[in-house]
Amino acid sequence: MTISDQLFAICDAQPFVTRFMVRNLLTGEEIRRGADEETPSGSTRKTSIMMAALKAAHEGRLDLDEPVTYEERLAKEVASGMFRYMTPGIVISLRDAITGMMTLSDNVCTKMVLERLTLEEVDGYCKALGMANTHHRFLIPPLALPADHALTTVTTTSAADQVLLLQTILDAQSSTQAQEKLGCSAELCSFAMETLKHQILRYGIRSRLPFETLVASKSGRGKRGRMDAGIVYKGGAPFFIITAYTDDVPQVMADGTPGYTLSLETIGRLAQACWNGFQS
């Protein structure tokens, strides 16, 4: 069975939709399933928010050392991260807010960052990069969204759009052309990559890889499914990019297992199959 057949079989084994794209960085081989279809982004959208903020910093419109105060209002309608449980009045830098947004997916930090940008700016940034199926629509998705919500009620993206973004950030570690495309200096592009590597959430892509495997990624969750997008390293070098988005995931599977459990397991199996299959 080819690696492509294995990946499709993993998806076919579940009753929900799984869209993905993988790129073998050693050979250039790509495998796609619904990769250009619009899908809820969950917190994978935050990678583009980070890059838009870094572009604004590079242009002098934002100061990464600006002190940002955690105010009680920032914890409203927030369902991820740790700041919402902490005492208002804490002061951090904008740089640290970006770090919190990415490493812990903290939505208080996300608000701190987005309040210094506009959704139109972030959305336009994605379009300029070529992310045609990415649409930033809301600061923070409403908590009361139903499980069958419409795509137009959340920020959306595609598996291919996220591969494009991650590949550009990876290329920008050494390519001035990629740095110019992102609108960031080499130093800021390096900060972006290191921040992606520091995400502490280890379900999804990481869950079935060797424990010490380095992954530069951003995961996400939504009412319709789970998602993860990252660059997997082997021996200190980039190995493959994988972006996977599950959708229409049942709240409870037929055997009583929570749907999100199988959603994350599916993403982990896809990454594991790439890890094993691309080595042969």
Image: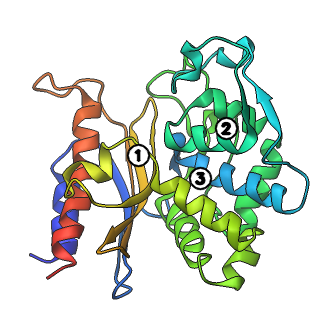
- The residues bearing labels 2 and 3 have C-alpha atoms spaced at a distance of 13 Å
Q: Which residue type carries mark 1?
A: Met
Whether residue 25 sits left or right of residue 141 in the image: it is left
Q: Is residue 63 above or below residue 144?
A: below
Query: Badge 3: few (under 14), some or many (20 or more) residues near its Cα, within 10 Å?
Result: many
Q: Is residue 14 above or below residue 176?
A: above
Whether residue 247 sits left or right of residue 78 in the image: it is left
Residue for point 23% across, 24% down: 252
Residue sitting nearer the eye, 244 or 34: 244
The picture places residue 200, in percent across and down from the top left corner, at 40, 42
Q: Of helix, strand and loop, which one carries label 2?
A: helix
Q: Which residue is mark 1?
A: 227
- The residues bearing labels 2 and 1 have C-alpha atoms spaced at a distance of 22 Å
Quarter of the image for residue 225 reads: top left
Please name which of the two marks, 2 or 1, marks the residue nearer to the observer.
2
Closer to the N terminus: mark 1 or mark 3? 3
- The residues bearing labels 1 and 3 have C-alpha atoms spaced at a distance of 13 Å
Query: Badge 1: few (under 14), some or many (20 or more) residues near its Cα, within 10 Å?
Result: many
Say if mark 1 contacts mark 3, CB within 8 Å.
no
Residue for point 58% across, 38% down: 100
Quarter of the image for residue 137 reads: top right
Residue for point 86% across, 49% down: 62
Q: Of helix, strand and loop, which one carries label 1?
A: strand
The picture places residue 49, in percent across and down from the top left corner, at 68, 49
Q: Which residue is mark 3?
A: 47
The picture places residue 216, in percent across and down from the top left corner, at 44, 59
In the picture, which quadrant includes the C terminus? bottom left
Q: Which residue type carries mark 3?
A: Thr
Q: Is residue 201 above or below residue 195?
A: above
Residue for point 28% across, 42% down: 264
Marking on residue 146:
none
Q: Which residue is mark 2?
A: 97
